[in-house]
Image (cartoon, grey):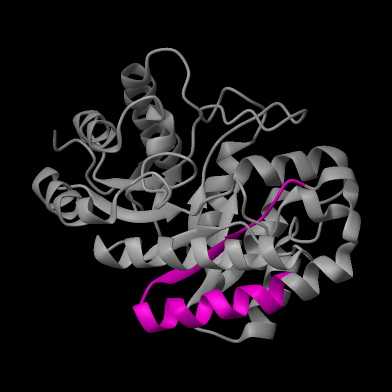
Amino acid sequence: MERNLQTGRWKIGFHTWSFASLPLKSALKHIRNAGFTEVEINADKTHLDPRVFPRSELSSLKNLLNDLGLHPNSAHAPIDGVDLSAQNVDIKNRSIDLLVKTLEYCRAIDCPILVVHPNHSDSISLGREVMKKNSIENLRIVVKKAEDLGVKIAIENMINVGGERFGSRISDLKEIIMNIGSPYLGICFDSGHANLQAASSDISIRDEIIDAGEYLWTLHIHDNDGSRDQHLPPGDGNIDWGLVIRTLREANYKGVFMMEIQERGDPDYLAERCLRIATEIIQA
């Protein structure tokens, strides 16, 4: 069970989304048995989502993580029903309330980072400038609560639907960070989303990683063939992983090599295979 020793510079982590069909506590045991010591906990409609996970069970969840020797590097905030760029007041307030509750859950289990989408694709029709204004205004409220709780927020680069989505570039995320100006706000770099950008433009994965710089706190590592968001294990798509690893080292990345792979087939085999693949590409 002690296979996931630090590989070079980074520990390798795995996402409970790969075990979405299992209850959270069971998923965590499977991830630890696969050899991981770092985990990102899904909180979108399952697992740690405050809409489905009772607050009364947080203490026992924290104890289980400690007993397993599994560190909750991060949690993925709810996506369904959440839109920080929404114009609708009810949607905005519901989004803020749910994200604040998820931050409280993170604090209760000593999870240091909550990964948050800066907006939802439903708001693309508003245009980039309105999306930016609303995202900054609403996220500022959430970040204030994050500061109070001592939990960091890492905003994620999104899929650039139709070429008009604010938040799909690292430069967009840095605009949000600079406007809010909090040391509790950083970036989660999603390799698959960046690869879709690179496939349809002259934007490079390398440039996006370098641009994140000191704000790069965590990763969503997965692969695709450039056509859609497939969340494949590294090497099953067309991402140049040698380039990714070299660039992360150049950027002096100090976080966890966190994989976000969609559940398919035998999830135990998937987890073990992903650990082998990640170890190989990091050490290559």
Say whether residue 62 is visible. Answer: yes
| Residue at x 26% of width, y 39% of height | 36
With respect to residue 220, does 254 lie above or below? below
**x and y percentages locating residue 38 in the rendered image:** 29, 48
With respect to residue 227, does 119 lie above or below? below
- Residue 138 included in the magenta stretch of the image: yes
In the shown orientation, is residue 225 left or right of residue 42? right
| Residue at x 62% of width, y 66% of height | 212
5 or 26: nearer the viewer: 26
**x and y percentages locating residue 176 in the rendered image:** 69, 75
- Predominant secondary structure in magenta? helix
**x and y percentages locating residue 175 in the rendered image:** 73, 76
With respect to residue 52, does 169 lie above or below? below
Image quarter for residue 237? top right
In the shown orientation, is residue 168 left or right of residue 209? right
Quadrant in which the C terminus appears: top left
With respect to residue 24, does 7 lie above or below? below
Say whether residue 254 is visible. Answer: no
The single residue placed furthest to the top in the displayed view is 265
Image quarter for residue 279? top left
- Residue 191 included in the magenta stretch of the image: no
In the shown orientation, is residue 5 left or right of residue 271? left
**x and y percentages locating residue 109 in the rendered image:** 24, 60
Image quarter for residue 103? bottom left
- Total number of numbered labels? 0
The single residue placed furthest to the front in the displayed view is 90
Quadrant in which the N terminus appears: top left
Identify the magenta region: 135-159
